[in-house]
Image (cartoon, rainbow, N blue to C red):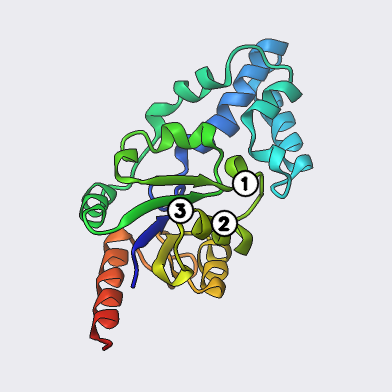
Amino acid sequence: MVTVISFDVDGTLVDSSFADRVWLEGVPHLYAEQYGIPFEIAQQKIIKEYDRIGEEDIRWYQLKYWFNHFRLEGSRYDLLNTYKNEITVYEEVFEVLPRLHKKYTLIVASNAHRDFLSLTLSTIEIYFDHIFSATSDFKRVGKYEEFYREVCRQLNVHPGEVAHVGDHYTFDYEVPRQLGIHAFFLDRTRRKGRGLRNLREFEEEILTLEGIENSHP
């Protein structure tokens, strides 16, 4: 029986515009202003450094690291707040979360750093009982089996009691399924031509799953 419903964040609850603007516009803009170079040159340099570190390195996700690396003045929190109006929660989220919250324990299971999550989830965090960040809480990159296993351990639930939804085919679908979690792939852009189109469809899947489980003696 499903008792916990887990959500990815970027691409699932919110679009990526906030994070994209911070990384691709905000950091380069600060660099350009501080070192007196054109924005385009600063942006090229910054992106080159992002690529050099790479997504497999936990530093890639840490805004604090990049402020130190580029010796940027000011506060990373001020930078994040500059772009907070770019946070766009998908419209159906405000319908689906209140309904599911009445019956299930809702959690966030994200790879994003807490620096971002604290703002990204500000308008909907009241619906979540727990928020887990792979990069902040477990100091790991990627939501591998160890991540989901530790989440289940902390919640004191069996993987079969958890349903998870997210837009990364490997980390939100294949990996949790291997552990026994009821995982659902969300493909809002229809890039893969399969998966759920929105969280309303996910809610329907949960209701269907609940019906199947209740039909068993």
Left/right placement of residue 15 relative to residue 44 reads left
Q: Looking at the image, can residue 7 be seen?
A: yes
Label 2 Cα neighbours within 10 Å, binned few <14 / some 14-19 / many ≥20 = few
Label 3 Cα neighbours within 10 Å, binned few <14 / some 14-19 / many ≥20 = many
Image quadrant holding the C terminus, namely bottom left
Badge 2 amino acid? Glu
Residue beneath label 2, please?
A: 150
Q: Quadrant of residue 25?
A: top right
Q: CA distance from mark 2 to mark 1?
A: 9 Å
SS of the residue under disc 3: loop
The image position of residue 178, as x and y in percent, is 56, 74
Q: CA distance from mark 2 to mark 3?
A: 16 Å
Residue beneath label 1, please?
A: 138
Do callouts 2 and 1 mark residues in contact (Cβ within 8 Å)? yes
Badge 1 amino acid? Phe
The image position of residue 177, as x and y in percent, is 51, 73
Q: Residue furthest bottom?
A: 217
Residue 88: assigned label: none
Residue beneath label 3, please?
A: 8
Image quadrant holding the N terminus, namely bottom left
Residue 212 drawn above or below residue 1: below
